[in-house]
Amino acid sequence: MTTYIALLRAVNLGPHNKVGMADLRALLTSLGMQGVQTLLQSGNAVFQSDARTAAQLERLIEGAAATQLRLETVVMVRSHRDWKGIIASNPFPTEAKEDPSHLLVLPLKESPARGAAGALQDAISGREVVRVDGRCAYVVYPDGIGRSKLTSALIEKKLGTRGTGRNWNTVLKLDALADSMP
């Protein structure tokens, strides 16, 4: 059995894409996932599965969410091992320690094209800083996320791929939850 972390993009933000975490756990369990646990109300799940890849799990969960929950969303799935790599590759250790709520990790559907990360950094009008490592972007929002002009839409447009962000505190909580799996 492999432990996986699944992140649903843009759920429970405002009136759209509402999903209860009990419903998400039930959906994942109905798909054969074992030991399903959720974290917060923002579409974070940890579970175990075998005989599937992360990409296969993404497609399976996206399809089932659409048909069973009427939830149109993008899902990012990473193995726990890959999640550990995301944590280890964090290019902003000082920010992770001193201001973890303003450091976002964005797992991406695909690796951005060469030069896309530079184009994104060039498009930033504030003090935000972005680093991309494969299928993951790290963004520091020193002045806060809420009023920043560096939006998810701009990030996705410049990188040419979909993603979903979690702050560093949530990244570590998901890791701890995955560590607790048998």
Image: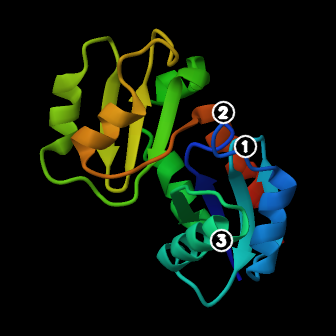
Residue 155 placement (x, y as % from top left)? 32, 36
Helix, strand, or loop for circle 2?
A: helix
Q: Nearer the viewer, residue 78 or 179?
A: 78
- Nearer-N-terminus badge (3/1): 3
Name the residue located 62 percent from the left edge and 43 percent from the top edge. 171
In the displayed structure, 152 sits above or below 124; it is below
The amino acid beneath tag 2 is: Asn
Residue 138 placement (x, y as % from top left)? 41, 37
What is the basis of the colouring in this image?
Answer: rainbow
Evaluate whether residue 180 shows in this view: no
In the displayed structure, 98 sits above or below 36; it is above
The amino acid beneath tag 3 is: Thr
Evaluate whether residue 48 shows in this view: yes
Contact? badges 1 and 2 (CB < 8 Å): yes
Which disc, if any, is residue 173? Answer: 1
Q: Which residue is mark 2?
A: 169
Which dot, 2 or 3, sits closer to the camera?
Answer: 3
In the displayed structure, 86 sits above or below 170; it is below
Q: Nearer the viewer, residue 91 or 39?
A: 39
Quarter of the figure that contains the C terminus? bottom right
Q: Is residue 50 left or right of residue 98?
A: right
Residue 72, picture quadrant: bottom right
